[in-house]
Amino acid sequence: MAFLKVVPLEDAMKIVNSMKLEPKIEEVPLEEALGRVLAEDVVSPIDVPPFDRATVDGYAVKAEDTFMASEAEPVRLKVVGEVHAGDFPDFVLDAGTCVYISTGAPLPQGADAVIQFEDVEREGDEVVIYKPAYPTMGVMKRGVDIPKGKLILRSGTRLGFKETALLSAIGMARVKVYKKPRVAVISTGSEIVLPGQELEPGRIYDINGRAVSDAIRELGGEACFLGVARDEEKRVAELILQGIAECDMVLLSGGASGGMRDLTSSIIERLGRVYVHGIAIQPGKPTIIGEIDGKPVIGLPGYPTSCLTNFTLLVAPLLRKLIGRETEVRKTRKKLAHKVFSVKGRRQFLPVRIEGDTAVPILKGSGAVTSFVEADGFIEVPENVEILEAGEDVEVTLFG
Amino acid sequence: MAFLKVVPLEDAMKIVNSMKLEPKIEEVPLEEALGRVLAEDVVSPIDVPPFDRATVDGYAVKAEDTFMASEAEPVRLKVVGEVHAGDFPDFVLDAGTCVYISTGAPLPQGADAVIQFEDVEREGDEVVIYKPAYPTMGVMKRGVDIPKGKLILRSGTRLGFKETALLSAIGMARVKVYKKPRVAVISTGSEIVLPGQELEPGRIYDINGRAVSDAIRELGGEACFLGVARDEEKRVAELILQGIAECDMVLLSGGASGGMRDLTSSIIERLGRVYVHGIAIQPGKPTIIGEIDGKPVIGLPGYPTSCLTNFTLLVAPLLRKLIGRETEVRKTRKKLAHKVFSVKGRRQFLPVRIEGDTAVPILKGSGAVTSFVEADGFIEVPENVEILEAGEDVEVTLFG
């Protein structure tokens, strides 16, 4: 066999990380920004609120006019006008006068407090005030919520509805976000057919094409599923080249058989370069890492759990890097729910389901689609370990 | 004022929940099912795998032919053919013979074990076997992963990448999911302008329109933001009617002023019916619940935190019901980080940020957009309570 470049997992991860892939940035309308990752630090270009704003419906006054007010000796102020939300008062309030003002409206110059209308009496064109107002009462001062020039969101922030609302509040109609990396996904294997097609004898329905495509989408990438390549050299090469032309990266989920993998590897070698053919982990060994025209081409194992495990270890960090998020795989510490046995001399990755504080090993084998559906992630059993005891502390790497 | 239908929160929630809104179901291609909620129980129409399948590359044998094999006295079997993944062998294996088989390929009739090729020696058209094989060795039996007729996913399940992969594995090309409820969103208030527009004196940028639209989308609904309605009766009525015509529900996020709210309420009263105008909570009182042509029309308060609080209490449960998910608001128990004071006789909702096991009250006031951005949810301070002590157990309702 021509390709026996079996390497340790860490070397494979280093090779993938050293590939020259830079995050790309695009500007999108704010309405399309939800769920995207911010690619710029955002500084507010305005004061919020942009003016001294009434926070109650009532009367805008000069507070000092009311300092002497009491139940026994109320103060009377002349009402000289009205200011509604959306208006902009272009006059200056004189001593001894006030204006009716609605919540959200700007205070006229000279006014520094708003007394809510429940607290005064209106008599003709006057209001009767029984209690002193203090400056800023009933007022949100200009810029107190967000001062102009303040850094409000950092590059790398995922934009949820609170963040898009914040960007709206400062008037940003467009925002720079990381471009979604486009990933071509190809299922290989002569036994694979797509859902909706007839299942001829000897065939099985595609699992990995859908799993990998949707995992890419959940991570924030764009998946282009190119379909199934049977083991004809011409067809596999065509689909790989289509992926290279249209996308930033090509993922092949392996056919089950060794022959299919060797075919895939020889095609990548012919069109570009193969760095890795085989990773020293169990399961998940049949993994290919190559490059065509400077774009990564990664062949994942055919077994669903192995496929997803290696996707998590090798591809997800790359995708997260491309969308400007942390590149580390996501890990959590749990207690092993029951004893498991491993094979000495083999570095094993075991799928587990998380239940509260425990990690429950799933022992159906990596060929089963159900073991992959039940699993939340996997634990590593090092080469020199044969038994992990129940209750032992384990580090679970979460899928995706 | 014509509309003084102030009701307790519980009554408002009951009125919203009693509105005749039924979840709708649609069928989508599996490629578009990610993130949707399943609207049918799914039973597998096939066995997975659909045939006895080789799990290693090697030789398919009758196990009993190998029972006597040993290092000293190996067994020799004649290789009579090859079966590759995707093939379907239409012959029966005779005693004393075997076939080369690749991983994923179906076992021929008569074979019941696969010995991996590393464990045998090939000599011409024979393989030399040094160890007995047992039946099912190297084989995944038909239906062992998912038997035909098994319930694999229940209605109400959110479809992540593992679930879509499972549906692919059983060949489902289309799947029934809950239709996304369409919600019209209108920002009202003469002071509101949209991002990208010039901020004239006295105006502020829209916050709630974006917040509510994107919160709806995060919940799994479809938001149709119809824009800003200034306080002209004609325009507000037009936008409400457009929302009623195009969507399942209309949400107005209130202008700050009482006048705008009364205008909105009188329009809804004219076009349909107003059930509630005012809820006895603080902040968040200025809330309108009505109905036009059998569709809910809900006016939320203008202050961002109040708007989101009432969205969480009144609208989110309705949306979750419409997409077939649990209708309860999401709650969590935390310890209060520091003492807070309330006003006796007022039922208050206080925004809080969650930090580990504690809920940190945010005391900027519900008018501040920053308090809403920092908050994860809110706690309730009942009418008869004036002080909540630091360390007290509180129930936090999460936003959205």
Image (spheres, coloured by chain):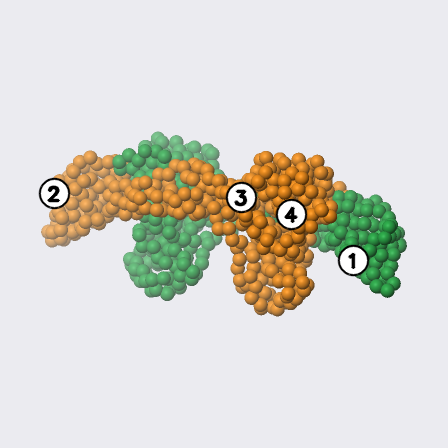
Chain colours: A green, B orange
**Within-10-Å neighbours for mark 3: few <14, some 14–19, many 20+:** few
Label 1 residue SS: helix
Q: Quadrant of the N terminus of chain A?
A: top left
Residue indicated by mark 4? B288
Q: Residue at x 64, y 62 (%)?
A: B383
Label 2 residue SS: loop
Give whichever of B333, B81 is nearer the camera: B333
Q: Circles 1 and 3: CB distance less than 8 Å?
A: no
Q: Which of marks 4 and 3 is nearer the N terminus?
A: 3
Q: Earlier in the sequence, mark 4 or mark 2?
A: 2
Calculate the distance from the C-alpha at mark 4 to the C-alpha at mark 2: 83 Å
Of circles 1 and 3, which is in front?
3
Q: In which quarter of the image is residue B89?
A: top left
Of circles 4 and 3, which is in front?
3
Residue indicated by mark 3? B20
Type of residue at label 3? Lys
Give whichever of A65, B386 is nearer the camera: B386
Badge 4 and badge 2 in a common chain: yes
Q: Circles 2 and 3: CB distance less than 8 Å?
A: no
Type of residue at label 2? Gly
Q: Which of marks 2 and 3 is nearer the N terminus?
A: 3
Label 2 lies in what chain? Answer: B
Residue indicated by mark 2? B96
